[in-house]
Amino acid sequence: MGLDIRWPIGLMFTLIGALLAINGALVKSDHAISLGVNINLIWGIVLLVFGVFMLAGAVRGGKNPPSA
Amino acid sequence: MQPIHLAWIDYTILLAYVAFVIGIGWMLSRYMKTSADFLTSARSIPTWVTGLAFISANLGALELVGMAASGAKYGISTAHFYWVGAIPAMIFLAVFMMPFYYGSKARSVPEYLKMRFDERVRALNSVAFAVMTVFASGISINALAKLLTNLLPWQFNLNFGPIHLGSYDSYLWICSGVVLIYVLKGGLTSAIYTEVLQFFMIVLGFAPVVWLGLKDVGGWGAMNHSLQAVAVNPSAEFLKEPGISYASNAWTSAWTPVLAGPAHNPMGVDWFAMLFGLGFVLSFGYWCTNFLVVQRAMAAKNMMAARNTPLVAAVPKMFFPFLVIVPGMIAAALMSMPDKNYRIPPPIVAQANYDQAIVAVKAANPADPAAAVTAVGTALGKKIDDKRIESLIAAEAGGKLSDTEIKQGLYNSIAENDYDSVILSLVKKYCPAGLLGLALTALLASFMSGMAGNVTAFNTVFTYDLYQAYFAPGKSDRHYFLTGKVITVLGIVLSIACAYFAKQYNNAMDIIQLVFGFVNAPLFATFLLGMFWKRATGTGAFIGLFCGIGSSALFHALTIAQGNVPGVKGGYIKVLSTFPSEMAQNFWLAAFAFTVCFVFTLVISLATKSQKTDADLKGLVYSLTPKIVDNNMPVYQRPAVVGIALLIVCVILNIIFW
């Protein structure tokens, strides 16, 4: 099929990752910290890295930019 | 389960996901030109995508919930459903069966049966499959609508003339509507793409829960240590009846307790039923013949990609126990640690019953604890732990506790676990706003793609194997393309009807699932003989399959699992044999039905004349098909080599958790 699946996956996880990481960095109430871990910040960064990795793959594949 | 408070960030993640799946459908709709594009993805998808979709179509939300439940109930032995019950069959599919499915140019599994045998076998298989997918999709969407009604704070009360929509109805229609939009737009490709998206959502949404859970119990070693205490006295966590005790490794070793016999493992199964019933009949029957999963591999872009699809899928499948079963083990371990203040949620009890029970606790006479315990138990309407109620009454004596504290005490004293809520209770315990949205979205995603997967398998089988075959052969492709779309809408509408049916008649639903078990149990015998024995005839296959289905119904009617009353659970004609557990009964049933189907197909095939010549069967039967030569590809890409490597890793995993 014409659409490279890495575009939507990459975009979605970059977006969600950024959202979580920013939220984790700003909101530091007791409630947001689980077992002494700022999990939103850490996991947001993990998702962000994954999303960017997928986007990089899609760009390198180069078949179809999202506007195709 | 009480409602969860969701913050704006959780809703944003949820909405982002929904927007993305609809967007994918939208982007794909421009490529949908023919019925093949819509129903079979025109065989164009790369391996890693079909591989992840293959595994994701199987990893529905019910599986996610069910595996965590079994992890708590049975411990690491649950992993047999993966290491014994999936990996070998997936490798067999890739190496031996995929060449026939893909090479025969069949568009569906029933169509392969028609090519190999005849119309009767195809009709039997396609009708059973079509009905089954609609029910599976209905069950999935019913569970989702129920979950959302319980979790989300919004109450819907909509009236459109005579039609009234409550919360359940609204969630049901909204979620089905989303699935309808993206399947209608992008067909099978849409379903496959969202399955891949769902795969990553589940892995990335639940991994932090496992991580935090393990951190909370003090790491892997500490969890196993606690589970040893659980195994010796499982009634303390309400996992088994009082008085039952196992060796200390019953929850933490996969094989030793099973080898020791049915009385020594919490599943109540023996090694033969495990290996033959689960590992051979059920597992090969599901992974090698169920069109829902096989369809993913058939959408691959070439033979090589099709054969590698199940192999790509086997890699994550092998490690899924750590994602889906370990949470259940964490829950059981947490429950045994008093300072963690956690229990697996009990079945939901209405506030009115709690109120009555609170009154009973207050009115209790500490001098007569037995009567007081009975009164509280009657008020709650559930099995209760006598000792805990007694100490609650003692603590309360003279009005020392508030109503909230008494309610908490009662909650902790209900001696039943609602295992299906294990996973959500952990998500709630560990996830702050943000991560909570991610985990819930992952759950929602798997429910919706469970529906989409079934609907896309349904529309292909219905359009090609029923409509084109029996009602309107020889029309233009445009005609079947439009039919496929209409059937998609029909599939969704039927699923919604089934969801309402499942909501109304829980027992009827159990019976229907039971009947599907009967239909599926013998199926692999038909395929095995069909693919590897050219002498198998259509008549033999048809009668063999019928006898196999009949024999599983008969087997069920004559046997029962310990602790069950004769009726829906079996033994409705006469109880000839009693199994230690329902699981053992199921495994043996499968083994029996397979054997009957195998023998009947064999004998009747020998007695009847084959209608097919060797030339007809070329590409459909092993001995008449030229072997695929893999020599021109690198060693590490050959399915046989990769398959063996995967098997070795799987054996190593079994040994580590022996």
Image (cartoon, coloured by chain):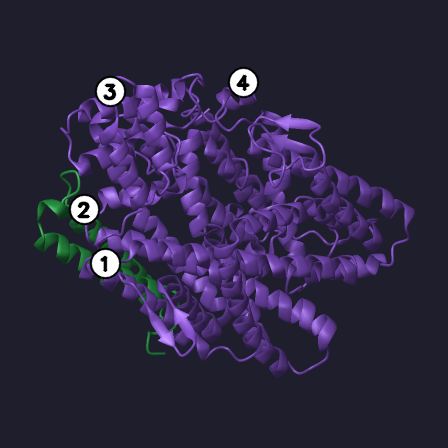
Chain colours: A green, B purple
Spatial CA span between label 3 and label 1: 48 Å
**Above or below — where is B110 with respect to B369?**
below
Rendering quarter of residue B421:
top left
**Residue behind mark 3:** B366
Q: CA distance from mark 1 to mark 2?
A: 15 Å
The residue depicted at 45 percent of the width and 46 percent of the height is B63
Neighbour tally class for label 1: few under 14, some 14-19, many 20 plus, Cα within 10 Å:
many
Q: In front of the other: label 3 or label 1?
A: 3
Badge 3 sits on which subunit? B
What is the CA distance from the residue labelled 3 to the residue labelled 4? 45 Å
Give the spatial CA distance, label 4 vs label 1. 47 Å
Pick whichever, B77 or B265, lies toward us: B265
Does residue B557 sit above or below B93 in this rendering?
Answer: above
Q: Say which of B412 and B658 sits in front.
A: B412
Q: Position of residue A59 (x, y in %)?
A: 31, 67
Which quarter of the figure is the C terminus of chain A placed in? bottom left
Q: Is label 4 on the same chain as label 2? A: no
Which of disc 1 and disc 4 is earlier in sequence? 1
Mark 1, secondary structure of its residue: helix
Mark 4, other Cα within 10 Å: few <14 / some 14–19 / many ≥20: some
**Callout 2: SS:** helix
- The answer to which quarter of the image holds residue B383 is top left
Answer yes or no: is residue B24 visible.
no
Q: What residue did someone put label 1 on?
A: B10
The nearer-to-camera label among 4 and 1 is 1
- Residue at 27% x, 41% y is B355
Which numbered circle lies on residue A39? 2
